[in-house]
Amino acid sequence: MSSGISLALTLLFLTLIKSVPIVYAALGGVISERSGVVNIGLEGMMTAGAFSAVVFTNMTGSPIIGLLAGIFFGAFLGFILGFAATFFKVDQIVAGVGINLVALGGAAYGLVLIFNQPGASPQVNQLGSGGVPFLPQVTTGEAAFIVLAVLCAFGLNWFIYRTPWGLRIQACGENPRAVTDAGLDPLRLRLYSVIVSGALAGLGGAFLSICEVNLYSDGMTAGRGFIALAAVIFGRWTPWGATGAAVFFGFFEALQYVLQGRISWLPSDAMQALPYLAALFAIAGLVGRVRAPAADGVPY
């Protein structure tokens, strides 16, 4: 196999792997914003998922239990954000920022409290660390997460556009008064949507800590929750659009790894900024050309 084809395959598989956590968080952002709640706290929910997955894997020796813990604690932060944004009408941006700060600070403190070491946790059992036949660049765990991400995108697209509950959630994001007039409770629907959003973000965080690697380190989510928010907007608040945008940003994250050591004149810091620059330019190009759900971010 020529070096060019080998490099292209490496970039392809690395793109899929780097896209996975962004896809999950972006899908969470879609369902939350479709219901009318801006989920700025995706970064914190990913952090909670990544940290709790390592803690419970360390305690039980089972990465499956760690994965479930990551989903649970992501959903728990989703519940807190959803409850504050709906029933207490706390400013959604402020509440989301608070979620991020609490999660980041809590994980840093938890490293010292639980593992007695700052910065990073001990190594834990990795989820699906075996290789996939004929695909040496991908582990079985990563392959499973990639397949599950596609199923989640398909399932969420079907749920939002083809089921009564999905249509009601869309109505919450467009006109919650109409939902009330129909005899339903838009606040509960928004709360449930943000809980699901948190669970998906926690799943993405767990992928980072117990599948892609086998430990938690401070700042390991590295702004992926914010990139996922950009993917939601870039994808026009649709599941498949957000998934495509997440893969687009994942490509630039993969590209930085492929280019490192190959372009000597470009500083490594500039390479690491590629996915963030891609997100910035993508959003800047869409200003004034896309429309969010009418009641997105509006308390009811």
Image (spheres, rainbow, N blue to C red):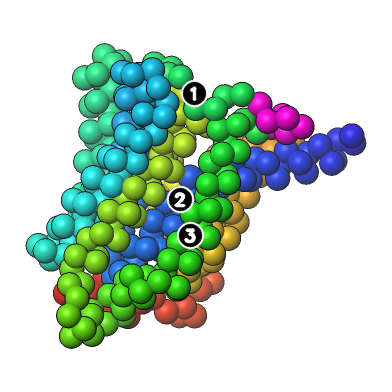
Residue 273 versus residue 136 in the image, above or below: below
Front label number (1 vs 3): 3
Task: From the image, tell me which residue sits under label 1.
Answer: 126
Residue 135 image offset from top left, x and y in percent:
73, 33
Q: Label 2 amino acid?
A: Tyr
- Precedes in sequence: disc 3 or disc 2: 2
- Write the residue at 18% across / 51% down: 80
Q: Looking at the image, which residue is at 31% across and 18% down?
A: 59
- Seen in the picture, residue 29 relative to 266 is either above or below; the reply is below
Give coordinates of residue 45: x percent, y percent: 32, 45
Of 99 and 81, the residue lying toward us? 81
Q: Which of marks 2 and 1 precedes in the sequence?
A: 2
Give the amino acid at mark 3.
Gly
- Residue depicted at 50% across the width and 31% down the height: 211
Which of the image's four quarters has the C terminus?
A: bottom left
Q: Which mark is residue 73?
A: none
Left or right of 289 in this view: 52 = left
* Residue drawn at (65%, 40%) of the image: 14
- Residue segment shown in magenta: 131-137
Circle 3: element type: helix
Secondary structure under the numbered disc 2 in the rendered image: helix
Q: Which mark is residue 155?
A: 3
| Whole-number angstrom distance, CA of label 1 to CA of label 2 | 19 Å
Asked where in the image residue 175 lies, by quadrant, the reply is bottom left
| Quarter occupied by the N terminus | top right
Question: In the rendered structure, does residue 139 fall within the stretch colored magenta?
Answer: no
In this rendering, the label closer to the viewer, 3 or 2: 3
Q: Amino acid at mark 1?
A: Gln
Residue marked by disc 2: 24
